[in-house]
Image: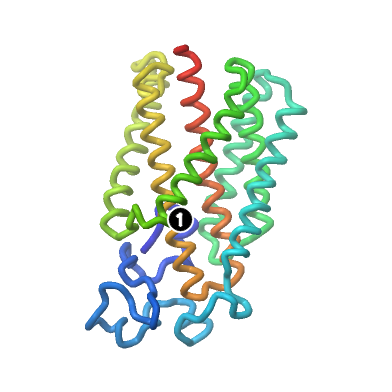
């Protein structure tokens, strides 16, 4: 199955060439859920690109040399998120709140977007490219966080706590099995996500042309709060897809360098949640 995240959809974490496939997750004994009587049940690594292209064997223990482990994912994620944090702290400390800083933040965001797209279309992970993306993303977050803090004191700190709470709760729900990440679950979630992005794009155009005053759907009122909550829930949905993709990548013996892609994808999702959380905190603070 392909994640909504363009990084995971490019290579490695998808076991087929279509948009479904969570029902072929490896289970104890080498069988797969829902594959009885299928070619995969007779050949348990028929849909494993790592077994076919690199190793030529069924899934093995993640500890096998050269294969991705959870420790690899955690370490790369810490490095990537750490780079974002350092960039944000430096931008906050060195760049005063001004129109110049605002345009610098927009420029950093655009550069980060371009770097993200370049990495998304590369066939292999580039640690330098990923860390550069994280650095520019950090500058963007640092500037906008300082701007929000100047108007709503403490908003960035609350947004960080909120992002941690959403991420932790999502991981708990996922690991507890309260949410089953299936192809149907992903299709429904992605349909909602696409609709959300399209509506936000139309809203942006209406605001730009003065048709929707005060931000339209992204206003600082109750409607804006509802939209923000929906966006955060979508971020949590993306996290469940990312968790599943990483879990399957480890189980199927993904090469170790894929951990950089996992870290990259998780960072993008967490940035999404933080930005939306920052807006939501500001809205609630404005209505106090």
Instruction: Tell me the quarter of the picture where residue 220 sits.
Output: top left
Query: SS of the residue at dot 1?
Result: helix
**Image quarter of residue 102:** top right
**Residue farthest along the right direction in this orientation:** 94
Q: Classify the position of the N terminus by image quarter.
A: bottom left
Residue 203 horizontal side relative to residue 134, left or right: left
Q: Position of residue 180 (x, y in %)?
A: 32, 57
Check the image and report above or below for 246 versus 265.
Answer: below
Residue 109 horizontal side relative to residue 128, left or right: left
Seen as rendered, the residue at the extreme front is 176
With 83 as the anchor, is 58 left or right in this view?
Answer: left
Rendered position, 94 above or below 238: above
Query: At 34% across and 86% down in the image, what residue appears?
Result: 43
| Residue where numbered disc 1 is placed | 242
Q: Quick one: 213 or 243, which is closer to the camera?
A: 243
> Colour scheme used in the picture?
rainbow
Q: Residue at x 42, y 44 (%)?
A: 236
Q: Which one is in front, 276 or 175?
A: 175
Instruction: Name the residue rendered at 67%, 40% in the picture.
Output: 85
Q: Position of residue 192 (x, y in %)?
A: 30, 43
Residue at 33%, 76% (x, y): give it: 32
- Residue 182 rendering spot, x and y as whole percentages: 31, 60
Q: Position of residue 142 (x, y in %)?
A: 66, 32
């Amino acid at each position: 199955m392909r994640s909504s995240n363009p990084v995971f959809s490019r290579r490695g974490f998808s076991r087929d060439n279509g948009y479904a496939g969570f029902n072929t997750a490896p289970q104890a004994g080498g069988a797969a859920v829902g594959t009885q009587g299928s070619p995969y049940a007779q050949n348990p690594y028929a849909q494993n690109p790592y077994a076919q292209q690199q190793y030529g064997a069924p899934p093995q223990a993640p500890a096998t040399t050269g294969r991705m482990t959870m420790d690899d994912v955690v370490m790369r994620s810490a490095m990537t998120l750490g780079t974002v944090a350092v960039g944000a702290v430096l931008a906050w400390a060195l760049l005063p709140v001004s129109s110049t800083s605002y345009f610098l933040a927009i420029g950093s965001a655009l550069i980060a977007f371009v770097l993200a797209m370049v990495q998304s279309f590369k066939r292999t992970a580039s640690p330098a490219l990923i860390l550069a993306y994280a650095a520019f993303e950090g500058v963007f977050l640092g500037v906008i966080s300082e701007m929000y803090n100047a108007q709503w004191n403490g908003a960035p700190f609350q947004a960080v706590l909120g992002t941690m709470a959403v991420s932790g709760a999502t991981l708990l729900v996922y690991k507890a099995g309260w949410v089953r990440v299936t192809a149907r679950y992903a299709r429904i979630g992605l349909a909602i996500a696409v609709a959300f992005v399209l509506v936000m794009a139309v809203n942006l155009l209406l605001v730009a042309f003065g048709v929707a005053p005060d931000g339209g759907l992204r206003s600082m009122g109750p409607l804006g709060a509802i939209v923000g909550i929906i966006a955060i829930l979508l971020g949590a949905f993306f996290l469940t897809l990312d968790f599943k993709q990483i879990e399957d990548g480890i189980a199927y013996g993904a090469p170790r360098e894929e951990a950089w892609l996992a870290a990259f994808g998780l960072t993008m999702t967490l940035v999404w949640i933080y930005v939306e959380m920052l807006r939501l905190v500001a809205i609630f603070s404005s209505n106090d």
